[in-house]
Amino acid sequence: MNIYSLMARFFAFIALALLMYGFIIPSVGFHGTPERIKDSKVEDIPSYVYPLWNFYQKGRYFSVNSPEKSKGDLKKMIETSEEIGVASLPIWNFSLEAPNYPKEAFPHGLPVFIHFDGLSGEVHEMNTINHYVGMAHMERGGIYERALAPYALIMLAILLAFFIIYNNKRIDRLMIVPVCLPLLFMGIYAYWLYWFGHTLHGGAISIEPFMPVIWGDGKVAQFSTHAYPVIGFWLMVVISFFSLIAWRLKVRALKYQPIEKVNWVQHLLMFTVLSMGIGTSAYMLKTDIEVDIFGKISSLTNAPKVNEAAEMAVPEPSKSEKEAMQKERDEQRKEQDLKVKALEKRAGSAGKFKVSSMYKSNCAPCHGVSGEGNMGPKLVGLSRDTILKKLLEYKANEHEMHIAVIEYMSEEEIEKLAKEIAQFEAQ
């Protein structure tokens, strides 16, 4: 083995180690956990997930509404019903600034971080804004990509391991994949941005189809947007750089020495790597079946297109469908109650919002943090009966702008919301 071959293996090993640390270990370790949390199956979360997630959250962004004692502690985040992102390193940051998210309450604007296997940051708040301008929820983007990412990363790790173990020109040519990894991500990311900007339905404001900014600053209606790469992307660039160096060194090594004869040690290493890859993939597949990830993907992909949904007639649901809908409503109410209780523990304050989580999440983005009006009409001064009548009409008539907000709210919850809004006073 000459110096070029040795150096090629060394740089490929560094690329593999970075890939494992930044993406594979957190993606595989946290796999299926968001679904278990959402389905209220916290008891099924393996014990190793908690220290793993806590370790990877050091230095990460946490919502301004998250209590200090819960930040970075998965168990406490679940107990207080906080928004929990995936564990892997974030690759891209898309943030938004709006007048109703003041700097003193949201110093970083509304940031959402894109990962190989999911999202993190202010996803719920961003979905509220998307609803306002007629865009789809962020979970609709990259459905298959997020689900398949951990499997693809394992295959990439196996490729790098084979490159290290063997001197084989066919395997060496496959190094084009890790070399082009940042470009592959950028291509997929750009496609989904285009899809979001060109798949619109009627919102509170009408905007023409557009291409959201990929890298840099932009503006959508009255919102300022910022999109920039973060640590995960730069780690991919480093992996790409080391992979390219390793590839070129291996090509040079094979010019100056005959191809080495494969020995039993190399075969044993290959068998070990394949066994680990297959075993890990089988574990993730079992997890996907347990949390019904395939059913969730099917429900998202078979949903009507956003701009066609309002035009389709909704058939009368069957008895079983009604029961399922009622169960989902009950789960929504339970989740809302947990959030309200969590806010009450924080002295009734959510950042700078002295309102309930129900109002903050569903109404504040359009109507202002205290009903003062912003992009939506002013609510201050309206009576409880006026507000209640209007909300019930919206629910009964499936008003396009409000149905996604109040669809799963009971009449009792709507009455509570109307009472709260009626108590707003002019600032």
Image (cartoon, rainbow, N blue to C red):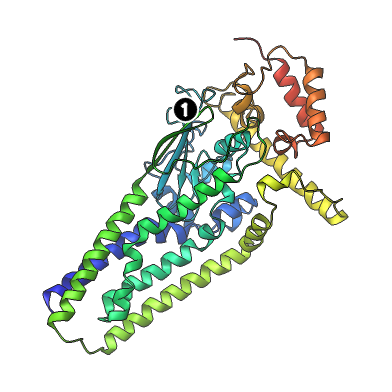
The residue nearer to you, when weighing 363 against 97, is: 97
Residue 12's spot in the image, x, y percent?
26, 67
The residue nearer to you, when weighing 302 against 422, is: 302
Relative vertical location of residue 419 with respect to residue 341 in this rendering, above or below: above
Residue 137's spot in the image, x, y percent?
60, 44
**Residue 404 picture quarter:** top right
Relative vertical location of residue 40 with respect to residue 126 in this rendering, above or below: below
Whether residue 1 is visible to the viewer of this picture, yes or no, is: no
**Residue 363 picture quarter:** top right
Query: Label 1's element?
Result: loop
Residue identified by numbered label 1: 106
Whether residue 366 is visible to the viewer of this picture, yes or no, is: yes
**Residue 243 picture quarter:** bottom left
Quarter of the image with the C terminus is top right
Amino acid type of the residue tagged 1 in the rendering: Phe
Callout count: 1
The residue drawn where x is 64% and y is 18% is: 371
On screen, residue 402 versus residue 276, left or right, reads right
Relative vertical location of residue 363 with respect to residue 214 in this rendering, above or below: above
The residue drawn where x is 42% and y is 42% is: 93
Quarter of the image with the N terminus is bottom left
Residue 306's spot in the image, x, y percent?
66, 46
Most distant residue in the top direction: 426
Most distant residue in the front direction: 208
Residues packed near mark 1 inside 10 Å, few (<14), some (14 to 19) or many (20 plus)? some
Residue 29's spot in the image, x, y percent?
46, 60
On screen, residue 423 versus residue 257, left or right, reads right
